[in-house]
Image (cartoon, rainbow, N blue to C red):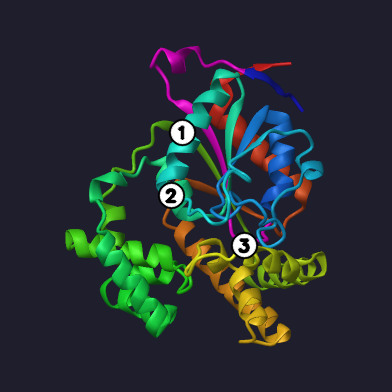
């Protein structure tokens, strides 16, 4: 395998060409982590996590967070950067990732986004305009109170009435984003989905986007196996530790998959078996929503993960070489 020894960004810095950006995305449990390490080794890349929950410290098992050994000395960014009591937004991700892309490029390395949070990744790739819509704090508090009184499902149903497409993409327990979608409509009279479609969809980057897919039945099997492994590794104890921090109502991390279900068990609302089965069901639905989101991104080149791993790896190397050959220097 010919490796890129470093990246030549002279024409990028002079404004002649765009900054190359490698992206690997796909649903949970499809196999992004292992593949990303192998790609990063060959292409001298630094990985920027595109996962909305891996930013939080103390949330390792439930987010399937990569550990130091698995990283194999590949630099990783936007992992463990904030405490779980603090909400981290897509707009913050966009700003932080943009800065990291520049810093990684300045080191003559390849910026490499890896993750499954569609809004975060797409907002970065196409420079979504977040600030222009504005905020209404009073409206948000009203919606939070409505959810507290009537339940997250009732709040989600309000969104489904005005913006069915956004409702399909967002889990009922993702109250922060559900409320934001309602707020966008409240402030502009235009749905969140319409706002997204009106984005320019022109990237400031030279994109190479690889999407990983797999047969639905096999994906669901992998999801269930991963959750069983999480339980064996101590997911319940991890959630106990988060609850011990006395998080506020509608704490963002505790609404995440795995954390919400285990918290329901610890509050006596579900048996442990019921919580695990609910987690498996909700994770399957989440994976389906991830794929639905990514299918709207036309620039993705899809790889079927049912095929031999090495064959897939070689196919992806070929895609990257064809896209970024101009920028590389070799060893």
Q: Secondary structure at mark 3?
A: loop
The residues bearing labels 1 and 2 have C-alpha atoms spaced at a distance of: 12 Å
Closer-to-camera residue (54/249):
249
In the rendered image, which quarter is residue 144 located in?
bottom left
Distance between the alpha carbons at the discs numbered 3 and 2: 24 Å
Evaluate whether residue 285 shows in this view: yes
The magenta region covers 7-30
Query: Could you say where residue 175 lies in the image, as x and y percent from the top left?
Result: 43, 68
Location of residue 296 (image quadrant): bottom left
Q: Nearer the viewer, residue 156 or 296?
A: 156
Q: Closer to the camera: disc 3 or disc 2? A: 3
- Is 124 part of what is drawn in magenta? no
Residue 75 image position (x, y, % from top left)? 68, 33
Camera-nearest residue between 163 and 266: 266
Looking at the rendered image, the quarter that the C terminus falls into is top right
Q: Residue at x 31, y 78 (%)?
A: 158
Question: How many other residues sit within 10 Å of disc 2, few (<14), some (14-19) or many (≥20)?
Answer: some
Position in image of residue 262 (x %, y %) = 66, 75
Which residue position is annotated with label 2? 90
Whether the residues at callouts 3 and 2 have beta carbons within 8 Å, the answer is: no
1 or 2: tag closer to the N-terminus: 2
Find the residue positioned furthest to the left.
Answer: 189
Q: Closer to the N terminus: mark 3 or mark 2?
A: 2
| Left or right side of 186 for 22 | right
Q: Report the disc number at residue 98.
A: 1
Judging by the rendered image, the residue that carries numbered circle 3 is 245
**Which secondary structure, mark 1?**
helix
Image vertical order of residue 249 relative to residue 60, above or below: below
Separation (CA) of disc 1 from disc 3: 32 Å
């Amino acid at each position: 395998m010919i490796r890129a020894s470093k990246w030549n960004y002279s024409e990028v810095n002079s404004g002649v060409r765009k900054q190359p950006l490698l992206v690997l995305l796909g649903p949970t449990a499809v196999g992004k982590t292992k593949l990303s390490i192998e790609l990063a080794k060959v292409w001298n890349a630094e990985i920027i996590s595109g996962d909305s929950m891996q930013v939080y410290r103390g949330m390792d098992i439930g987010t399937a967070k990569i550990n130091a050994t698995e990283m194999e000395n590949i630099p990783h960014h936007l992992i463990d950067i904030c405490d779980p009591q603090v909400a981290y937004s897509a707009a913050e991700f966009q700003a932080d990732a943009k800065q990291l892309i520049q810093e990684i490029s300045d080191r003559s390395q390849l910026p490499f986004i890896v993750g499954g949070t569609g809004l975060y990744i797409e907002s970065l790739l196409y420079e979504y305009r977040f600030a222009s819509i504005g905020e209404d704090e009073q409206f948000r508090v009203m919606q939070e109170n409505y959810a507290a009184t009537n339940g997250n499902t009732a709040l989600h149903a309000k969104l489904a009435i005005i913006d069915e497409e956004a409702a399909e993409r967002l889990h009922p327990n993702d109250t922060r984003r559900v409320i934001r979608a309602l707020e966008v409509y409240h402030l502009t009279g235009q749905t969140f989905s319409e706002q997204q479609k009106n984005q320019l969809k022109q990237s400031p980057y030279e994109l190479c986007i690889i999407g990983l897919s797999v047969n639905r039945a096999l994906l669901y099997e992998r999801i269930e196996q991963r959750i069983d492994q999480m339980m064996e590794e101590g997911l319940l104890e991890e959630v106990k530790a988060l609850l011990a921090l006395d998080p506020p109502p509608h704490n963002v991390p505790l609404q995440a998959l795995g954390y919400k279900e285990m918290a329901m068990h610890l509050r006596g609302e579900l048996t442990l078996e019921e919580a695990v089965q609910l987690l498996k069901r909700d994770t399957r639905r989440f994976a389906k929503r991830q794929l639905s989101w990514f299918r709207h991104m036309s620039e993705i080149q899809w790889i079927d993960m049912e095929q031999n791993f090495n064959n897939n790896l070689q196919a992806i190397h070929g895609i990257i070489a064809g896209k970024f050959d101009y920028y590389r220097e070799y060893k």
